[in-house]
Image (cartoon, coloured by chain):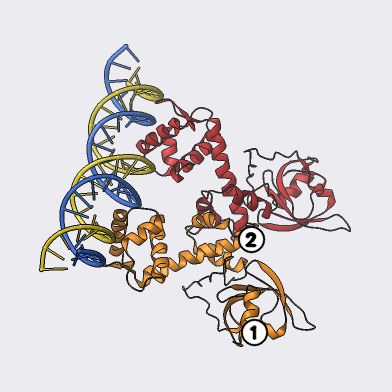
Chain colours: A red, B orange, C yellow, D blue
Amino acid sequence: MFSLSEENYLKAILHLQKTSKSGVSTNAIAEEMQTKASSVTDMVKKLSEKDLVIYKKYQGVYLSDTGRKTALQIVRKHRLWEVFLVDKLSFSWDEVHEVAEQLEHIKSDKLITELDKFLEFPKRDPHGDPIPDAKGNFHVANKTLLSNLSKGERGTLVGVKDTSTEFLKYLDKNNIALGKTIEVLDKEEFDESMLIQTGGKTLRISPMVTVNIFIKQ
Amino acid sequence: MFSLSEENYLKAILHLQKTSKSGVSTNAIAEEMQTKASSVTDMVKKLSEKDLVIYKKYQGVYLSDTGRKTALQIVRKHRLWEVFLVDKLSFSWDEVHEVAEQLEHIKSDKLITELDKFLEFPKRDPHGDPIPDAKGNFHVANKTLLSNLSKGERGTLVGVKDTSTEFLKYLDKNNIALGKTIEVLDKEEFDESMLIQTGGKTLRISPMVTVNIFIKQ
DNA sequence: ATTTATTTTTAGACAAAACTAAAAATAAAA
DNA sequence: TTTTATTTTTAGTTTTGTCTAAAAATAAAT
């Protein structure tokens, strides 16, 4: 098992690694973790000893396979707890982070397996970020049409089928945009219209719209 | 806020304090916490500085008012999490302790308030131990007759009304004893008989029995 | 009331994780 | 290509919580 501090470093490195093609710099980690570069050097050496990162002096840090796997499990736990807090304990999305930062370090495989089941295997956290599975893989669903979603499901808008100015203007006017999360609050059986939530707003859209929006879940 | 270690010491002292009328000894704490007496002395000094315990050299330790309140909040959190694990995540009662030991240290008032609400304000943990409320008080219900409980409720056998040898022998034979937890699994409308669970066994008892058993919930 | 045994405390060390300040390496600029 | 600036590392401390071994206090036994 790893210490709380080690876990936080791994998480920070995973996060920084995404936005820098080369190795992660000591300074960047220090900035991310609100600590000093010298502390980072110390810890990175320790993580390197344990084969969680690959590190050569002055050359930056890379996560090893086990390091990445470990970091992804912490992210998984963090995001599952966020879902729990919002869905079950009526936290709002802006209140969950601090508590999830603590809960993510609880050590128990059974706890996470059962929590995942209890939450009905959510694919995204309340901010729309994907939740890695037990093996560290993201569920990368192919895009589908919004019209294929059922009540309660949600996804991210990744494209449109109809690219006419009229349609895009309509989307714009209604605050429906690329990259935004759309949740299907209700689906009318009669006309297949949907009540959706996106960008904090709730609105009803017709099937003419739903069949022209691509979603990734 | 208090450190993980401080919280564990407070909890241990609270626990030991119940079974010793005088101050809690250094050695007893060391035994309870699987550590050395010298470490206990160090920590007890620190807790005394912070006015969480009353401590005079060689005289044993007593919890102060704030110390006891703090310890009770940790017990509250521990037991609420145990209920969560058993009721929601299908842990069995013997699997919960280790995980609850970790969860009890999560710091968030809202988390506990909401968890309590989510669990519908349980009064006892899965082992039958009472859960202190937010102010550190136990819900000390007056004793009632077992016959007053409805389906799903439970309590501890604290006394009997009929003290005849016949009745006590009957209880003995059926493994119904003082201090044991009794849970009402079902109540028959027709004859007011009850299906109860106690000491791992399930049995049906007549109203002649239920009106002669005192329960504390 | 001494001696003996037990408990408790002190003193000194250690490991983890952080810090400051100075030295070394690398990158940028003239 | 030197010089200058920036980044990174080392060296030496600090804090928290623990330990061992020895000293001091208390309790038990003769």
Q: Nearer the viewer, residue A56 or A157?
A: A56
- Residue at 49%, 71% (x, y): give it: B134
**On the image, which quarter does residue A193 sit in?**
bottom right
Disc number lying in front (2 or 1): 1
For label 1, the residue is: B166
Q: Quadrant of the C terminus of chain A?
A: top right
Disc 2 is placed on an element classified as: loop
- Residue at 54%, 38% (x, y): give it: A70
Give how far across and how far down residue D4 sits, in percent: 29, 26
The reply to whether residue A144 is in sight is yes
How dense is the environment of label 1, judged by Cα within 10 Å: few (below 14), some, or many (20 and up)? few
Question: How far apart in space, not on screen, are marks 2 and 1 (Cα)?
Answer: 51 Å
Taking B148 as reference, is C4 left or right?
Answer: left
Q: Amino acid at mark 2?
A: Lys
Disc 1 is placed on an element classified as: helix
Q: Nearer the viewer, residue B105 or A160?
A: B105
Q: Report the chain holding disc 1.
A: B
Q: Amino acid at mark 1?
A: Glu
Question: Residue B148: which numbered mark, if any?
Answer: none
- Residue at 74%, 48% (x, y): give it: A171
Q: Report the chain holding disc 2.
A: A
Taking A173 as reference, is B97 left or right?
Answer: left
For label 2, the residue is: A88
B14 shown above or below D16: below
Taking B36 as reference, is A84 left or right?
Answer: right
- Residue at 76%, 40% (x, y): give it: A143
